[in-house]
């Protein structure tokens, strides 16, 4: 059986990841075998409890950057071993809403933790399980702020500790994602996410389709 294929989606808050993941899954379903969608933090029973602590708990206001880093990677380690590796071994396509690039951008650059330390924790959590392709949706900070405001006022969404951080934090996150893209140009595909949803979906497909064709021919994917 050929190895599965692993795609992650990245981007700052309100970049449109959830929408584009759904559209890609709709496009793949029925013609590319089993498609499994997971998210970070979360994706397992243990991970979802960690997600609540990180984002929504009423008691998380004093959480340190170091605790945040370790909790994120505890969730990630569980997800990799419980879900992602078995799915890839079964030949599935795994699509993950955020993976380790988020930690580099948010905790490394946003929180300004030591990057060598951050990468060491990531390596311990994921080993050699890395995406075959990462779609990085890019929007200006003004667009992100506008979309986040609209999202808050449109529905009674629970408090999200990360979305409450200030502009300077998210400017650093943007720099982090630029560094991620520069460091892994063959893996990370940057897409302007400011056009219409339909146009962004086409741009995503233009990047993913040839990679999937190559995967189908070679029969190999992530470990």
Image: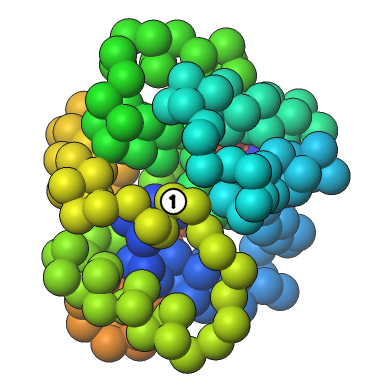
Residue 118 at least partly seen: yes
Asked whether, in this view, residue 90 is left or right of residue 29, the answer is right
**Vertical order, 192 against 93 (above or below):** below
* Residue positioned 49% across, 52% down in the render: 161
**Vertical order, 55 against 46 (above or below):** below
Quarter of the figure with residue 77: top right
* Residue positioned 20% across, 74% down in the render: 143
Secondary structure under the numbered disc 1 in the rendered image: helix
Residue 210 spot, x, y in % from top left = 38, 57
Q: Which residue is mark 1?
A: 162
Asked whether, in this view, residue 189 is left or right of residue 208, the answer is left
Asked whether, in this view, residue 153 is left or right of residue 59, the answer is left
Front residue of 141 and 193? 141
* Residue positioned 31% across, 31% down in the render: 111
Residue 7 at least partly seen: no
- Quarter occupied by the C terminus: top right
Front residue of 167 and 91? 167
**Vertical order, 15 against 106 (above or below):** below
Residue 158 spot, x, y in % from top left = 60, 69
Q: What scheme was used to colour the molecule?
A: rainbow
Q: How many marks?
A: 1
Quarter of the figure with residue 106: top left
Q: Residues within 10 Å of mark 1 (few under 14, many from 20)?
A: some
Front residue of 17 and 130? 17
Residue 57 spot, x, y in % from top left = 66, 50
* Residue positioned 45% across, 79% down in the render: 152
Asked whether, in this view, residue 203 is left or right of residue 97, the answer is left
- Quarter occupied by the N terminus: top right
Residue 109 spot, x, y in % from top left = 25, 31
């Amino acid at each position: 059986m050929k190895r599965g294929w692993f795609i992650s989606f990245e981007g700052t808050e309100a970049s449109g990841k959830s929408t584009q993941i759904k559209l890609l899954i709709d496009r793949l379903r029925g013609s590319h075998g089993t498609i499994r969608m997971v998210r970070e933090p979360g994706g397992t029973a243990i991970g979802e409890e960690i997600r609540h602590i990180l984002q929504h708990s009423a008691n998380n206001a004093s959480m340190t950057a170091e605790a945040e880093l370790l909790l994120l990677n505890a969730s990630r380690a569980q997800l990799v071993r419980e879900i992602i590796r078995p799915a890839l071994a079964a030949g599935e396509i795994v699509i993950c809403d955020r993976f380790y690039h988020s930690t580099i951008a948010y905790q490394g650059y946003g929180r300004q933790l030591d990057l060598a330390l951050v990468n060491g924790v990531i390596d311990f959590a994921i080993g050699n399980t890395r995406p075959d392709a990462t779609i990085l949706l890019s929007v200006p900070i003004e667009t992100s702020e506008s979309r986040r405001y609209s999202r808050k006022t449109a529905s009674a969404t629970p408090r999200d500790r990360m979305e409450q951080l200030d502009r300077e934090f998210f400017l650093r996150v943007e720099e982090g994602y630029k560094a991620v893209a520069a460091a892994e140009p063959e893996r990370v595909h940057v897409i302007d996410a400011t056009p219409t949803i339909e146009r962004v979906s086409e741009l995503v497909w233009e990047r993913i389709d040839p990679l999937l064709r190559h995967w189908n021919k070679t029969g190999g994917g992530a470990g």
